Image: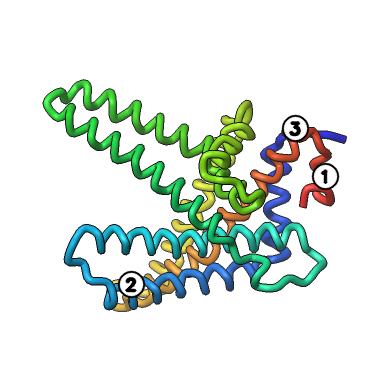
Amino acid sequence: MYHPFSIAETIKTAWNVIKKNYISLIVYSMISLIFYEIISFFTGFIVVYDNQYSQVAFVFFMMLVQSYLVLSFYKLILTLMDREYYEFEFRDILPSLKMALSFVTVGILYTVVIGTIIFLNLKLVNYPLLQQIMDKLEILGIGYLLIRSVFCLCFIVDEDSGPIESLKQSFYITWNNFFKVLGLILIVVGFIALLLIIINLFITLLFDVDSNSYIAKIAAICWFAISFPTVQVMIMATYRKLVYSHKDLDDDVSETL
């Protein structure tokens, strides 16, 4: 029987995915992080920042690297959800060049939007009252756009959608579910904040952070190891629930995963 999108059911679905696949998720996320740091380190020695063209090329290259890492992680989550009882290979979670370029294009579009907002703020520097009003409106506007478009990467990975198409699809499935999605985001943010407080309290009580800086780094890695996979799985579980609810299909776990 069809059920509308539910926050409780989404959290339950995400928890089941995390519980069954946490080791795979954390290992891959840590490998991705290490790989990105290695690429950044070696690229710093290769690229010469003597002009704007080389700087732009470097930024584009790093965005492309990041797109492959993020999208491959999303594909891993979808593969774990869809092929729970089947083996899969690395190529099954490797995104295509089209997907990576779509990711980069979405990033560029948001960069243009934010750059335009910054430009407008500079024009209002002599009007402090108007600037304060605009700041609040801009924060609300950007927050609204981010919530409505948060699933565009899911469509890029799952349906190989283009950048504009994926944004439209994300806006479509969040229509009439905006406040439920916002509620889920607040729950996730609250979880991340609580986790950070607990880890910080733990290391403060047991270790001298000032004299052992590596302890803080280990704590940061532990926080990342728990929070990052959790957030990504929550996004994918929410995406799947929203898609199936809009298709008027049964959102039973056995059907949607």
- 128 or 46, which is in the foreground? 46
Q: 59 left or right of 74?
A: left
The residue tagged with tag 3: helix, strand or loop?
loop
Q: CA distance from mark 2 to mark 3?
A: 48 Å
Q: Determine the residue positioned at 52% across, 44% down.
A: 163
Q: Residues within 10 Å of mark 2 (few under 14, many from 20)?
A: some
Camera-side mark, 1 or 2:
1
Residue 134 coordinates in the image, percent (x, y)? 28, 26
Q: Which residue is mark 2?
A: 209
Q: CA distance from mark 1 to mark 2?
A: 47 Å
Question: Measuring 64% from the left and 34% from the top, which residue is drawn there?
Answer: 173
Q: Is tag 2's residue or tag 3's residue first in the polypeptide sequence?
A: 3
Foreground residue, 193 or 21? Answer: 21
Q: Are marks 1 and 3 in contact (CB under 8 Å)?
A: no
Q: Quadrant of residue 138?
A: top left
Q: Which mark is residue 252?
A: 1
Q: How is the image coloured?
A: rainbow
Relative to 107, does residue 30 appear above or below in the rendering?
below
Q: Residue 140, located in which quarter of the rendered image?
A: top left
Q: Relative to residue 24, is residue 106 depicted above or below?
A: above
Is label 1 in a helix, a strand or a loop? loop
* Quarter of the picture holding the N terminus: top right
Amino acid under label 2?
Answer: Val
Residue 84 rendering spot, x and y as whole percentages: 78, 63
Where is mark 3, residue-wise?
A: 4
Q: Which label was assigned to residue 16?
A: none
